[in-house]
Amino acid sequence: MPDEEKTEAAERTSRRPRRRLTEGVERTLAVSLWLAILPVAFLLVSALGSFVYAVAVLFDTVREVSGHPFPVGHHIGSVLLEFDLFLIGATALISAIGFYELFIGNIRVGGRDVLPGWLAMRDLNDLKSRVISMIVLVLAVTFAEEAVAEPDALHLLEFGGGITAVIIALTIFVRWGNHTSGG
């Protein structure tokens, strides 16, 4: 019996440092989730920059159109550029929200969820789906912008084919690339 007690005491003392080490590593990993603040901050700054630039393009377009309203086709590219910039800003904003929700916590004000349901991120697949959807929109607008500006039909066909291939690949990735059950 005394040998068993000595063995148990030895096991307990050998487990204590291991448990402390494990708890320390877990604590460090939990705190490291706050590193996600860095991409959140940079994505927010990127979104703001994109929105500000889009507004600057809008004012420039209004100035140009008011000075020379015709031909209209010349100004469509500027309007499409604005759409593109706003979509890029929205993509950065959605990504910032997703990073924050996935790594840090739910966005709540006064104890209430403030995000619309469609923007809530439950897992990485939610974030990927939203960002890929925005990328598809940006690609579509970019193609329309190029179609307005490009007189060379062959170049436009090649450009459109490349964008189509990327959109198809992204669609396949979103549809069948998620490795969750029930998808």
Image (cartoon, grey):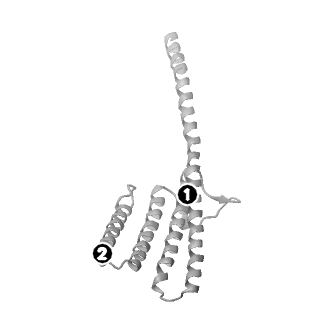
Q: Say which amino acid is labelled 1.
A: Leu
At x 43%, y 64%, the residue is 132
- The reply to whether residue 116 is in sight is no
Q: Extreme left residue here?
A: 154
For residue 136, above or below residue 69: above
The image shows residue 145, relative to residue 91, as above or below, that is below
Q: Is any atom of residue 181 visible in this view?
A: yes
Of 88 and 122, nearer the camera is 88
Judging depth in this view, the residue of 13 and 174 nearest the camera is 174
In the rendered image, residue 83, in percent from the top left (x then y), is placed at 51, 74
Q: Which one is closest to the eye, mark 2 or mark 1? A: 2
Res. 25 mark: none
Q: Which quadrant of the structure image shows residue 108?
A: bottom right
Task: Write down the quadrant of residue 137 in the picture.
Answer: bottom left
Q: Secondary structure at mark 2?
A: helix
Where residue 111 appears, as percent x and y from the top left, is: 69, 58
Residue 43: mark: 1
Q: Position of residue 29 (x, y in %)?
A: 54, 39
Report crowding for label 1: few under 14, some 14 to 19, many 20 or more residues within 10 A (C-alpha).
many
Q: Quadrant of the C terminus?
A: bottom left
Q: Position of residue 100 (x, y in %)?
A: 57, 54
Q: CA distance from mark 2 to mark 1?
A: 33 Å
Residue assigned mark 2: 157
Q: Residue at x 39, y 74 (%)?
A: 143
Q: Earlier in the sequence, mark 2 or mark 1?
A: 1
Front residue of 158/130: it is 158
Q: Residue furthest front?
A: 67
Residue type at numbered disc 2: Leu
Asked if the residue under mark 1 is in contact with the one under mark 2, i.e. CB atoms within 8 Å, the reply is no
Q: Residue furthest right?
A: 110
